Image: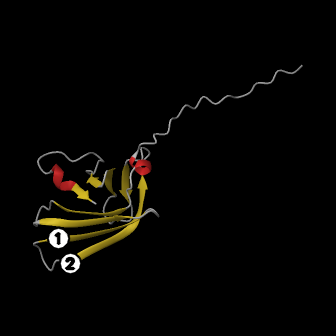
């Protein structure tokens, strides 16, 4: 009689069903005015679509001709399902933490912005 060994999976990865991607109604239009070093502020609108595309419109307030800049691209969720990275933007990918009816802009390292202006980096639905 031949001894057979069966491989048994010990993968106990648990999927968090309460992350932003699954639990929130995240698609929609988010707006706010974020700080600007050399203008009054940057009026910002981010549209997240169900098909994983986005549109970002920005207008520099109190500066020049008030031109609206529009960028389009795709976005991806991080492995936690809580942060989206906008792809297709000329600069580094812009990251937002997705909360209930809010997008919270993260810094260049992906950390929450802190300090007295932190609340100014939140776009609301």
Determine which of the numbered discs, if any, sits on residue 67 in the image: 2
Horizontal and vertical percent for residue 51? 47, 64
Give the residue drawn at x 37%, y 47%: 82
In the picture, measured across the screen, residue 72 lies left or right of residue 66, that is right
Give the residue drawn at x 23%, y 66%: 44
Horizontal and vertical percent for residue 5? 76, 24
In the picture, measured across the screen, residue 5 lies left or right of residue 86, that is right
Name the one closer to the observer, 10 or 88. Answer: 10
Horizontal and vertical percent for residue 65? 15, 80
Q: Quadrant of the N terminus?
A: top right
Question: Callout 1: 10 Å neighbours few (<14), some, many (20+)?
Answer: many
Name the one closer to the observer, 94 or 92. Answer: 94
Determine which of the numbered discs, if any, sits on residue 114 in the image: none
Q: Secondary structure at mark 2?
A: loop
Horizontal and vertical percent for residue 4? 80, 24
Task: Using the rendered view, name the quadrant where residue 72 is placed.
Answer: bottom left
Reading the image, the residue beneath label 1 is 60
Task: Using the rendered view, name the quadrant where residue 47 is placed.
Answer: bottom left
Give the residue drawn at x 29%, y 55%: 103
Counting residues from the N terminus, which is met first, the one under dot 2 or under dot 1? 1
Kindly indicate whether the residue at mark 1 contacts the one at mark 2 (C-beta within 8 angstroms). Answer: yes
């Amino acid at each position: 009689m031949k001894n057979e060994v069966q491989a048994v999976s010990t993968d106990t990865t648990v999927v968090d069903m309460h992350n932003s991607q699954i639990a929130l109604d995240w698609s929609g239009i988010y707006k706010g005015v974020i700080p600007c070093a050399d203008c009054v502020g940057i009026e910002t609108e981010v549209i997240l679509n169900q098909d994983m595309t986005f549109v970002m419109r920005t207008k520099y307030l109190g500066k020049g001709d008030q031109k609206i800049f529009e960028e389009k691209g795709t976005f991806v969720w991080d492995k936690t399902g809580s942060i989206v990275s906008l792809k297709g933007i000329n600069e580094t990918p812009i990251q937002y933490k997705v909360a209930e009816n809010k997008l919270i802009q993260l810094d260049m390292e992906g950390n929450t912005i802190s300090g007295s202006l932190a609340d100014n980096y939140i776009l609301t639905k």
